[in-house]
Image: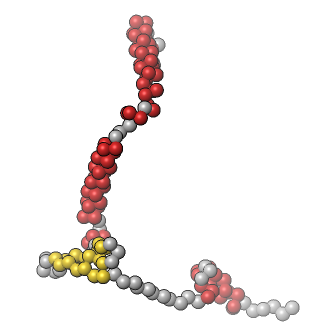
């Protein structure tokens, strides 16, 4: 519209200029009302929007799980309040069964050589090359 302000027919340019000036006046009048708390959404409206977002996100996750290639090769387990795991087992005959297993602590330890801890790949190579080198007598 700014380009039309300087258009050939002067009456069109004048009309566009008045429209733009009135729009500027209108926007100047609206700007002070941006900070009014009354125009903010209420707690109920925010809660409703959050619930809607949660439902939409739940549907997106459900679709992503169904279309995931990992769904074919891995099963899904649900942790029940950190004490038990719930697993649905799909059998070859098409039947499904559920299993609830209690959770307990599992620990695995492995020993690493002392010199492998710093930087396993490069450090080990450097140590091996130093061990192979012959010392020069001084």
Q: Is residue 60 left or right of residue 98?
A: right
Q: Residue 86 is drawn in which quadrant?
A: bottom left
- The percent coordinates of residue 127 (x first, y second) are 67, 86
Residue 57 lies, in percent from the top left, at 30, 55
The spot of residue 82 in percent (x, y) is 35, 75
Residue 60 at x, y percent in the picture: 28, 56
Of residues 81 and 57, the one drawn nearer to the viewer in this rendering: 81
Task: For residue 74, say whether it is visible.
Answer: no
- On screen, residue 94 above or below 135: above
Closer to us: 8 or 46 = 46
Residue at image location 30% in from the left, 70% down from the top: 70
For the residue pair 63 and 51, the one nearer the viewer reads as 51
Visible residue check, residue 33? yes
Image quadrant containing the C terminus: bottom right
Looking at the image, residue 17 lies above or below residue 99:
above
- Toward the right, the furthest residue is 138
- At horizontal 27% and vertical 54% (from top left) the residue drawn is 55
Q: Look at 26% across and 72% down and name the residue there.
A: 72
- The answer to which of 10 and 51 lies nearer the viewer is 51
Left or right placement of residue 133 versus residue 75 in this view: right
| Residue under the image location 42 percent in, 15 percent down | 22
With respect to residue 32, does 10 lie above or below?
above
Applied colour scheme: secondary structure
- Check the picture and name the quadrant holding the N terminus: top left
Q: How many marks?
A: 0
Quarter of the image where one finds residue 9: top left
Q: Is residue 102 left or right of residue 115?
A: left
């Amino acid at each position: 519209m700014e380009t039309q302000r300087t258009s050939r027919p002067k009456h069109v340019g004048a009309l566009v200029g008045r429209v733009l000036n009135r729009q500027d006046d209108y926007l100047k009048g609206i700007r002070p009302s941006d900070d009014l708390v009354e125009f903010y959404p209420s707690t109920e409206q925010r809660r409703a929007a959050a619930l809607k977002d949660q439902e939409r996100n739940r549907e997106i996750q459900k679709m992503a799980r169904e279309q995931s290639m990992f769904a074919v090769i891995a099963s899904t387990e649900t942790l029940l309040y950190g004490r038990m795991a719930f697993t649905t087992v799909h059998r070859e005959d098409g039947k499904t069964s559920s299993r609830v297993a209690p959770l307990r602590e599992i620990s695995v330890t492995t020993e690493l050589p002392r010199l492998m801890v710093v930087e396993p790949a490069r450090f080990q190579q450097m140590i091996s090359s130093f061990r192979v080198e012959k010392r020069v007598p001084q």
